[in-house]
Image: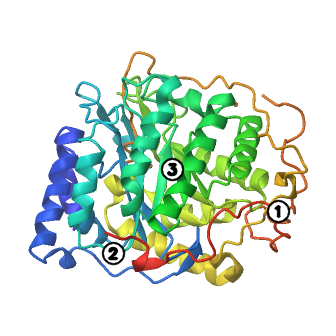
Amino acid sequence: MYQLVRPLLFRLDAEKAHHLALNSLRTLNNWGLDGFLNRPVADCPVDVMGMKFPNPVGLAAGLDKNGEYIDALAGMGFGFIEVGTVTPLPQPGNPRPRMFRLTEAEAIINRMGFNNLGVDNLVENVRRVRYRGILGINIGKNASTPNDRAIDDYLICLNKVYPHASYVAVNISSPNTRNLRDLQGGEQLNQLLNALHMRQLELADQHGRYVPLAIKIAPDLDTIAIREIADMLAFHRMDAVIATNTTVSRNGVLHLPGAAETGGLSGAPLVGKSTEVITELATALASRLPIIGVGGILRGDQGWEKLQAGASLLQLYSGLIYKGQSLVGDTADACRYYFDQNPTRRVFQRVVSQAAEPEAEDTAPRMESMDIPDFNAGQTGDGNVEEAASDAGTPATTGETPAADAGAPQPVATPPAVPPAAPASQPSGNHSRLV
């Protein structure tokens, strides 16, 4: 059905088509008619971040920034849904036009600019939904907030979304918020992660439930930067890493009309780059935390490749624009085949690093400042519309149980004498979100 409608949508401005498609899907859902469009998606349960996912195929942040279409999107068969990116205060984002299709390459360029109605609006929308599956809420900072005060914005959002989220994703990797990617390295990352984890533990105590934190990183990082980020995430007991956001690279599309537009590139040209980052992350992390793989999935077998590279969960965005709802089922089918062949991967078992013990040094791994290219130095806001770095010597975190297959879980090491990353009882499945 979508392939019949797509030519009409592609005649419209990309952002107008985006809203038309979502509003149409919501109308069909309200009338109970969306079942005629959506085919059943295969069950493929996996346990990640202490939660049971009905299947590992999720919706990436950016498609539903304000949480207005959750029930309609749930009908497409996703194993989990992530909404946002949301900021403390409403902001309009960058001037239009700000979303562009590169149809020949099955790609999208966007410079949306974290356009959203603010965190309070999103929370109210989430309170009203019927959906009781796993819901991620992606948080960011306002464009007007300088990086030295970014922690304040992230903590404001975390405080407000925590009671309503199954997990919270932290966006520090959009290429469309000026200097945002600087938060991916050095002391800024160390301070941000420390503040987030401390507040996470406080909120868990207040609300009587532990909500995992996932950090979303860019694809435009070198191997050394990925290793350093991995060590930092593990040290601060983050619960997952999302790889990756959009790219500032234009490799493979420079010859196409519209490729010179500023913004983050997503879709087919990103698939190889994001999978490479997943592979390097899996090696660097050695099962210390799970990876959510996103970027360029337009066929089920590309999702399979990200699982093989080390991802435990997957997310879709731009592929839906080109392939429609059938991509969810195709990717879930590929996942089920993968997990049938690799049954031990159905449950992510976290390996705790002995290097994090207090008698090792009670400081975070040292990270040099990274020069991450800012493709839109003159822009403001975020473009997470996929809507989807210097070596200080050897890796700072040592004493891991190395994985023979870096993506596969290893036997859990003896936990160190430090507080665990989460309480023993984690929320699961449909009961993971309280409203």
The residue depicted at 85 percent of the width and 30 percent of the height is 392
Q: Taking 188 as reference, is 80 left or right? A: left
Q: Earlier in the sequence, mark 1 or mark 2?
A: 2
Q: Which colour scheme is used?
A: rainbow
Q: Decide: few, some or many residues near mark 2? Use Cα within 10 Å; few <14, some 14-19, many ≥20.
A: some
The residue drawn where x is 51% and y is 81% is 44
Which residue is more in the foreground, 202 or 130?
202
Would you call the spot at circle 1 few (<14 residues within 10 Å), some (14-19), or many (20 or more)? Answer: few
Q: Is mark 3 on a helix, strand or loop?
A: loop
Residue 28 image position (x, y, % from top left) = 12, 69
Residue at 38 percent of width and 36 percent of height: 383
Q: How far apart are marks 2 and 3 (CA)?
A: 26 Å
Q: Name the residue under label 1.
A: 417
Name the foreground residue: 144 vs 100.
144
- Marks 3 and 1 sit apart, C-alpha to C-alpha, by 37 Å
Query: Which of the two residues, 116 or 291, is positioned nearer the viewer here?
Result: 116
Percent coordinates x, y for residue 53 in the rendering: 49, 75
Could you say which disc has been placed on residue 132 in the image?
2
Query: Vertical placement of 296 versus 88: above or below?
Result: below
Q: What residue type is labelled 3?
A: Gly
